Image: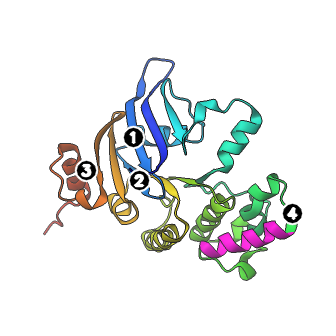
Amino acid sequence: MPNVGVEFAKVSYMLADGHVLLREVSLKLEAEKTTALLGRSGSGKTTLLRMVNGLVVPTEGSVSVVGKEVSAARTVRDWVLLRRGIGYVIQETGLFPHMTVERNAGLALELAGRGKAEIARRAEEVLGLAGLDFGALRERYPWQLSGGQRQRVGLARALAMDPAVLLMDEPFGALDPITRAEMQTMLRELLGRVKKTVLLVTHDLDEALYLADRVVFLEAGEVVADMAAAEVLGSENVAVKEYVGAVHRAVRN
């Protein structure tokens, strides 16, 4: 039986006004594999992803990371240890504008109290993994980088602590199509090397099929399909066919 990297056990989430965003979602994400969450806006994708690092707490059910329940984290130290084992990449990158590329990439190690030599070595290593020239860019600031370069620095920072789990929430959504394709190529090669349990939220079907081993479709807070990426285009599932049809429309004459 495959090792489980992240598990959602009958997870539900209800807002204070009674609106249900997620309803009894149960998923086991295989360790060192990439799972993509697809669905229209408001289907609950980002809410589910943010439960992994405790940014959203389920109303019901539980979430476990590498066999440990997220809800078991109670002290500040518990939360710090949990989140050090989970990398998080978002569309806006979240880089600190007053910090250099090198310091942004090594910030997690700095906060963990690591030595300067270790931080510098690791920053160079992860920036290289993300396809950046450390020597040329280390002293630059985020505003001096292109959108693609900033996203690479954000990815490098997420990898700095060598987390077991990597969360990616529409990481390339703000990039132009050519840069986005370059980023996808880089990420696919990188993930093949570093072997992380990845949960990827995206609206882009082709991106999901290119990067993920498995694709989960959400609709109105519920799982409506869960299958290997290779099975998606040929699926007879109504929800999947609708999504594929909306994305892959025939070119008009």
Residue extending furthest toward the top: 17
Give the residue at mark 2.
Answer: 35
Which amino acid type is marked by label 1? Leu
Give the residue at mark 1.
Answer: 27
Quadrant, the C terminus: bottom left
Kindly indicate whether the residue at mark 2 contacts the one at mark 1 (C-beta within 8 angstroms): yes
The secondary structure type at the circle numbered 1 is strand
Which amino acid type is marked by label 4? Gly
Residue 215: percent from left, percent from top: 34, 52
Which amino acid type is marked by label 2? Thr
Residue 129: percent from left, percent from top: 61, 73
Structural crowding at the residue carrying mark 2, measured as other residues with C-alpha within 10 Å and reported as few (<14), some (14–19) or many (≥20): many
**Magenta highlight range:** 117-129
Q: Earlier in the sequence, mark 3 or mark 4?
A: 4
Structural crowding at the residue carrying mark 4, measured as other residues with C-alpha within 10 Å and reported as few (<14), some (14–19) or many (≥20): few
Which amino acid type is marked by label 3? Tyr
Structural crowding at the residue carrying mark 1, measured as other residues with C-alpha within 10 Å and reported as few (<14), some (14–19) or many (≥20): some
> What residue sits 47% from the left and 17% below the top?
17
Which is closer to the viewer, label 2 or label 3?
2
Which is closer to the viewer, label 3 or label 4?
4
Residue 27: percent from left, percent from top: 39, 40
Distance CA(mark 1)–CA(mark 2) = 10 Å
> What residue sits 42% from the left and 37% below the top?
44
Give the residue at mark 4.
Answer: 115
Q: Residue 243 carries which label?
A: 3
Residue extending furthest toward the front: 1
Distance CA(mark 3)–CA(mark 1) = 21 Å
Q: Earlier in the sequence, mark 2 or mark 3?
A: 2
Residue 123 horizontal side relative to residue 190, left or right: right
Magenta span contains residue 123: yes
